[in-house]
Amino acid sequence: MAPIDYAALLRPGVPNDGGAVVGHIRQRYDFATGHPDPVELPLDELVAGLQEALGDEGRTLAWYPHPLGYPPLRDYLASKLRRDRRITCSADQLILGDGSSQPIAMVLYALLEPGDVVLCESFTYGGTLSAIRRMGAQAAGVECDEVGLIPDALDAALRRHAESGRAAKLVYTIPTFQNPLGTTADEARRGQILEVAQRNGVPILEDDCYVDLRYEGEVEPAIRALDEAGETVIYVGSFSKIIGPGMRLGYVLAPDALLSPLASIKTGGGVNQFAAMAVHRLADQGTLDEHIAQSCNSQRAKRDAMWAAMESDFADAATWSRPQGGIYLWVHLKDQNVDTADLVEPAVAHEVGITTGVNFHPEGTGGSHHFRLCFGFNTPEEITEGVSRLAAACADVGVAGVARAAAPVA
Amino acid sequence: MAPIDYAALLRPGVPNDGGAVVGHIRQRYDFATGHPDPVELPLDELVAGLQEALGDEGRTLAWYPHPLGYPPLRDYLASKLRRDRRITCSADQLILGDGSSQPIAMVLYALLEPGDVVLCESFTYGGTLSAIRRMGAQAAGVECDEVGLIPDALDAALRRHAESGRAAKLVYTIPTFQNPLGTTADEARRGQILEVAQRNGVPILEDDCYVDLRYEGEVEPAIRALDEAGETVIYVGSFSKIIGPGMRLGYVLAPDALLSPLASIKTGGGVNQFAAMAVHRLADQGTLDEHIAQSCNSQRAKRDAMWAAMESDFADAATWSRPQGGIYLWVHLKDQNVDTADLVEPAVAHEVGITTGVNFHPEGTGGSHHFRLCFGFNTPEEITEGVSRLAAACADVGVAGVARAAAPVA
């Protein structure tokens, strides 16, 4: 009786690195992960909202949730998308999921087979890149400028892949406060991207999960808003950045032809009703809008603190992004002799977490002179100190031009 | 510019029935779906638990949850499994998921390729059968007796499939209060099933989601408890039947070699932290045990009410199961001229929901003289009335031997 060889039984392609599964280790200055501010979570309001919802309809917890997710929260989202994103849709075109990562995984699972290609910004969100690779598919980067994806470059890439016999299945884009680049496409650019996708017959997966965190400038409509028939753009959003990732609530607005396939792919049934009821009451009573406004004020100050700290400590060593919103700076080291992958451990020695550029590189081969800093989690004072410590870590490994942190005043 | 043909873009095997996605339509006498009692949900206790948890550590909602799920809830589960199921395991061998359906889907995705075979009780849970078919795999039924899977039949089926060149990848079993059969394997039978699986080198997926709802008789250990090395049995459980499906919380205890693959397959990140914190406080403070004890008293009375009603209205027309727990009766009509699929609409006309036998048939071809009744949702009085109405529906379509519901007393 031999023990079962699970490695041999696994479906080909299922990741099996054999390692233990551990949680994210947070540094004191946690610029590595995309967190909102933990101090400002609307905890009391969530409890009050939940209490009210359970009083109204708590017995529905005994039922299996609607497969698309709690209908009143989908109603709210349909009206919010109309108000904030100029999107016309109905609640029954929305599927709630665990964060935006589950909806993104559902879309990728529905459309991708091994060997398929997804075009995306070079650079882009590492979680989506990992999900594409888990499908056995490939991400291919498209050149960007200061407002995001370059339409001519996208068109050329689409045609090149189609001519190679391996047409791209999907264009994945984060048009607002792009992660990690920080760019935002203006309306003209959004229209051009949509037109290129439509002309090439390829759907767009629009990831809009940062859009509510705007600190200045004019709101641009979603690409989905310009896609009036709603047939080209699959639109994904989330409550993770405006409430918290622990709520695990996001959504996808899908073309009608994709709704039933996506719903059948979703594992775990309709989204968590307990969390959805609490968030619905928070949102429907206007508390969420107030919370977003407060968060924007707070996050703007943090971004400005990080800009000031970078100016102080990295002016000669790096350039960095100037996003009007979101929670990230994208940093480009001038010193071409240092690989930013070699900065992670020295930064941790100074209690600073960063995420290196290769994590965002579609092909997984570039980004060695880049890293991303999240300013969402720490206070402005901590940000100043953390950037100073990061500069010290850079100096430790000999990065040219970086200011050595001043010795503590005796 | 042609519209995008999503049907052509879909990965082969992704279901695409083109229909709208609608929620379950509940009948007044809802014997169709596996619901716990909606009146007895511990709503106040859940809110109190959540409030306490958010006071203690609410800021963790700003973080991405641990990929295996909220560690204190996994600690609680490890101790509960030791106490109630004689299982020795650590919290880090458990992955929390959305109900038990997401963990089951993760296990199936990890192990099954199209054409693979899963052996299971004939009859068994339709949700797992659907998930197996969505993988392009096949379920094959094994004969059962009054304590469940027959070991010799399982052994013969495993050998037959291995010799056919298409070895079974997995044995799926619900050994306690089997859904829909209601059978429970004694310890000797559990040991025999384990021995057969080990001798054939095939893992067991043990679905134990009804085990806490025992109304009489002795507790039997989990099959996983007898698998001391923990290498053969993948064990799945859930809070859906002891709190509510709306909480979407379940778990899988996996062999060490499967943990990392399963965690990497799980979509949506670590399980909903908001719900997990509330359930942890409810469980850790003993309130969940009290709630389970109350539920068992209540559900026993409902089961007995359904038995009495069946005795009154179906004594000549059918036989039914005598489960010591769970929430289902499995009914076998004596009249071989009626297909139970033809009973659904007449039952709905009498405001009664039932689930017909074919939904539980592994090959999807049998069960035409069976249906399943859930007694978990309605009150004993409603159950009496609902069974009487079901008898009237049966009489409407000419089922032999059924008692016509008495006309209302004038």
Image (cartoon, coloured by chain):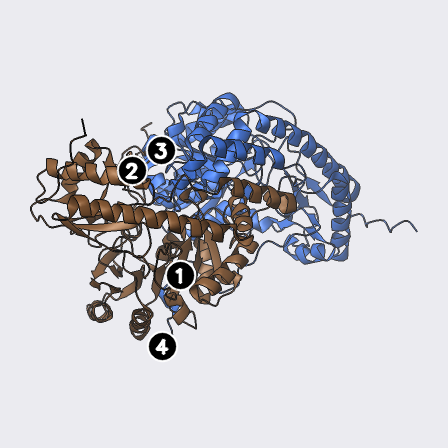
Chain colours: A blue, B brown
Q: CA distance from mark 1 to mark 3?
A: 45 Å
Q: Position of residue A6 (x, y in %)?
A: 39, 67
Residue at numbered disc 2: B382
Q: Position of residue B119 (x, y in %)?
A: 26, 62
- Give the quadrant of the C terminus of chain B: top left
Q: CA distance from mark 3 to mark 2?
A: 55 Å
Number of the front mark, 2 or 1: 2
Residue A201 marker: 3
**Near-viewer residue (B160 or A44):** A44
Sequence-wise first label, 2 or 1 = 1
Q: Are marks 3 and 2 on the same chain?
A: no
Mark 4 secondary-structure assignment: loop
**Near-viewer residue (B284 or B383):** B383
Look at label 2 and name its amino acid.
Answer: Glu
Residue at numbered disc 4: A2
Look at label 1 and name its amino acid.
Answer: Tyr
Residue at numbered disc 1: B235
Q: CA distance from mark 2 to mark 4?
A: 53 Å
Look at label 4 and name its amino acid.
Answer: Ala
Could you say which quadrant of the image residue A329 lies in? top right
Q: Mark 3 belongs to which subunit?
A: A
Q: CA distance from mark 3 to mark 4?
A: 52 Å
Look at label 3 and name its amino acid.
Answer: Gly
Could you say which quadrant of the image residue A316 lies in? top right
- Give the quadrant of the N terminus of chain B: top left
Sequence-wise first label, 3 or 4 = 4
Disc 1, disc 3: CB below 8 Å?
no
Q: Is residue B14 above or below residue B195?
A: above
